[in-house]
Image: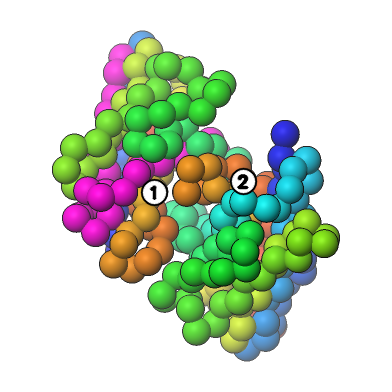
Amino acid sequence: QVQLQESGPGLVKPSETLSLTCIVSGGSISYYYWSWIRQPPGKGLEWIGYVYSTGSTNYNPSLKSRVTISLDMSKNHFSLRLSSVTAADTAVYFCARDHWGLPGIWGQGTMVTVSS
Amino acid sequence: QSVLTQPPSVSAAPGQKVTISCSGSTSNIANNYVSWYQQLPGTVPKLLIYDSTERPSGIPDRFSGSKSGTSATLGITGLQTGDEADYYCGTWDSSLAAVVFGGGTKLTVL
């Protein structure tokens, strides 16, 4: 059974870059879409983007200028970088593997707060 | 402002049936599959329905999905207090080239 686990700093300063990693266990990173999704406190879900196992990416147009998602096949993990963060980027960040094209298997999520 | 529109809240009594709607457009729901997610308080979203009508293994048949035109619907029968959660629809939007979610619907089982 594949499992995903997010890791990274829980506190990031404004204007800096948020960096998270999603470690995939119990399955290969090949042949799937690997997404990042976030949820601000008390609000709904927002898709950030995905990386396919070939390395191709697709990003939410509203975040595209600040987002980079990459994968490391040798380490079986994928990563998120979000630059120039503000308080509006404070959220729980989830990584997920697709199930027939849309997010299906989710990590537990990690809270990231943007504050000085 | 979400691309997909869901009612903010729905409610029903235990044992009853409830439906949650998800309204979109020709660039998303009408031409792409829909997934539904259940998020119990303080937990991770869980996939309930994929490909608009299919249930992953382990999801009881009390949960069902349907789609017609630019709208999709999640149905839940035999409501239980444990079904109280936020429910989200999601799909691919071909114009945005992005996954889009509804704003979520809070289900209260009275």
Residue type at numbered disc 2: Trp
The residue carrying mark 2 is: A106
Within-10-Å neighbours for mark 1: few <14, some 14–19, many 20+ = many
Q: Secondary structure at mark 1?
A: strand
Residue type at numbered disc 1: Gly
The residue carrying mark 1 is: B90
Q: Residue at x 35, y 30 (%)?
A: B53
Q: Where is residue B106, by image quadrant?
A: top left
x and y percent of residue B28 in the render? 28, 55
Quarter of the image with the C terminus of chain A in it: bottom right
Residue extending farthest to the left is B69
| Camera-nearest residue between A109 and A27 | A27
Q: Which label sits on residue B54? A: none
| Camera-nearest residue between B77 and A111 | B77
> Which span is picked out in magenta?
B16-41
Q: Secondary structure at mark 2?
A: strand
